[in-house]
Image: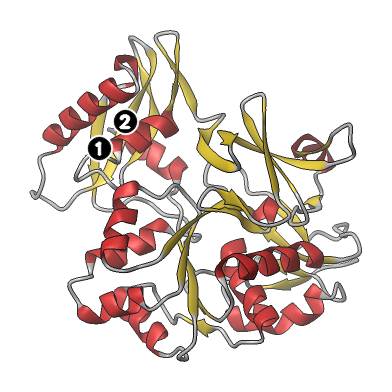
Amino acid sequence: MRLRTVDGGDAAAVRAGLPAALDGAAPLALGFEPGAGDTVPEGTAVVIATSGSTGVPKRVILGGAALRASAEATAGRIGSGQWMLALSAGYVAGLQVLVRSRLAGTDPVVLEGRFTPVSFVAATQGMGAGARYTSLVPAQLATLLDAADDPEVRAALASYQALLLGGQALPQALRERAADLGARVVRTYGSSETAGGCVYDGVPLDGVRVARVDGELRIAGPTLADGYLGDPALTARRFVTDGGGVRWYRTGDAGDVADGRVAVTGRLDNVIVSGGVNVSLDRVERTVRTVAGLEGAAVVAIADDRWGQGSAIVVALPGGAVEPDALLAAARERVAAEVGAVARPARIVPVRALPMLPSGKPDRRAIAALAAAG
């Protein structure tokens, strides 16, 4: 079956093509031109490109059944109502806002233009009086919290039945600030390969199974993608079937599962070797973000003449407002105490703004280049 290309940034076009796509009659290629030989299996709804935050983007094949299963499980967990689209429909979190709206029989409200507190308030005020929902990334939530002195922003935040937050780790400080303002935040974990978030606040959605195998989290259930367009070798590596015939997605994430709750500790491949010791940069970053003033920081690898590899903190700082050396000293002390002395970041790189991808995630390759340049 052939694909029809649609601009993922055009929410109206994606929404118009969604009914036929979910039925498998006219699958969509979101944001890319498929090759002449690119065909997809029966039942495919969309092929969606990953953000490529740390590597080459992949093209994930999602069936209509997987998208519907995810949307139905979400409604079962948090309820159903009207959704506001604040993300590109070319990414799975934005796409699922449209899918959930269709299954709920409601019209989504689309945030117009660039995401700002003003545009967020305007979109929220354009919604109906029933239960409201939206999906955001942490950077968007931080933008709203920083503007929460405005009573309209506070009222808008508190008006949602649930604010789904995914795409990257949610700093605890952000979640606490949101809770203080009455915002009901739900942390989600998942990916394009799982049709979006499939674990909410640590608990898998109905029908979803999460297991830890050799330190890696694996996910099974009806929301799994069919594989990767034009890459059967990668499909075979990432989607595996166990001896009982259960198909699992290998996430590449480290974590644990205990008493039905999932804890994600970071990427298995986001590890440096410093002085012969393995250091998880995800763990270092989580610790650094607990320091006041570094809540939005990124931690990336840098070369180190003595230890082989080290890490640097890259953070957006207002000019002259904070002394970077003091922040670095506080971060090094916190990391030494909670992770280990060998994991202490070597330097801090202040920037005007962190480079971001269109998906709202940090552009870690660009951030690493800034860190390397010092």
Q: Residue at x 74, y 64 (%)?
A: 69
Who is closer to the viewer here, 149 or 310?
149
- How far from the left and from the top, in percent, is residue 342? 33, 15
Tell me the number on the disc at residue 155: none
Between 146 and 178, the one nearer to me in the picture: 178
**Residue 107 appears in view:** yes
Q: Residue at x 59, y 88 (%)?
A: 107
* Of pointers 2 and 1, the one earlier in the residue sequence: 2
86 left or right of 191 in image: left
Secondary structure under tag 2 reads strand
Q: Are the two marked residues, 2 and 1, in contact with CB atoms closer than 8 angstroms?
A: yes
Tell me: residue 8, above or below residue 370. below
Quarter-of-image position of residue 153: bottom left
Residue marked by disc 1: 349
Picture quarter containing residue 237? top right
Return the x and y of residue 323 as percentages of the image width and height. Answer: 10, 40
The disc at residue 312 is: 2
Residue at x 26% of width, y 22% of height: 337
Q: SS of the residue at dot 1?
A: strand
